[in-house]
Image: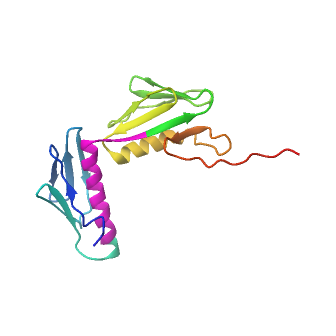
Amino acid sequence: MSRVGKQPVEIPSGVTVTVTPDNVVTVKGTKGQLEKAMHKDMKIAVEDNKVVVTRPSDSKNHKALHGLTRALINNMVIGVTEGFSKTLQLVGVGYKAQLKGKSLILNLGYSHPIEVASIEGVTFEIPDANTVVVKGINKELVGSVAADIRTFRKPEPYKGKGIKYSDEVIRRKEGKTGK
């Protein structure tokens, strides 16, 4: 069995997990509700405050889907209880972020400010002018929005300017040497 897939997902108190016959998993918790359609071959059962995922055969594809399905359900449970967040840092002279309503305005050294419209299920927080925190209950959506924001000005290796994740380490390069 898959090492990840054979472990059951614990359901904390205050969280309800329902599975429809066509493998649509719905997780409701204090922070909201998530719904995702899983692969039709996986068998998902809720037993004794645990979600158990089983696979029909030991084929390579089913082994991969087994661990994936369990991980997706686990992320849904964590999302509706704790939520997910990604922290981005703006490094550079004059780089700053600000909120305008629910949308995010970024000044990144271009001739114009960049406006990031708010997406349902994702919120932005700005603890200081050079830090943006992307929060939400859907791990996939939070990561996607954070990656989209990062693409506006990726960190460059010479001065380290750009938008980077807070835990990201930028490998610096040495510049040209003069004669």
Is residue 111 in the magenta section? no
Answer with left or right where residue 159 lies relative to residue 153: right
Residue 108 image-quadrant placement: top right
Place of residue 143 in the rendered image (x, y in percent of width and height, measured from the top left): 41, 45
Place of residue 137 in the rendered image (x, y in percent of width and height, measured from the top left): 30, 42
Q: Residue at x 27, y 54 (%)?
A: 74
Q: Residue at x 20, y 49 (%)?
A: 26
Answer with left or right where residue 18 lies relative to residue 105: left
Is residue 64 in the magenta section? yes
What's the magenta region? 62-86
Number of numbered labels in the structure image: 0
Place of residue 4 in the rendered image (x, y in percent of width and height, measured from the top left): 30, 64
- Looking at the figure, which quarter contains the N terminus? bottom left
Render colour scheme: rainbow
Position above or below: 144 against 64? above
Position above or below: 87 against 23? above
Q: Nearer the viewer, residue 159 or 68?
A: 159
Position above or below: 1 against 145? below
Residue 52 image-quadrant placement: bottom left
Q: Residue furthest top?
A: 100
Magenta span main SS: helix
Place of residue 146 in the rendered image (x, y in percent of width and height, measured from the top left): 45, 41
Q: Residue at x 37, y 48 (%)?
A: 140
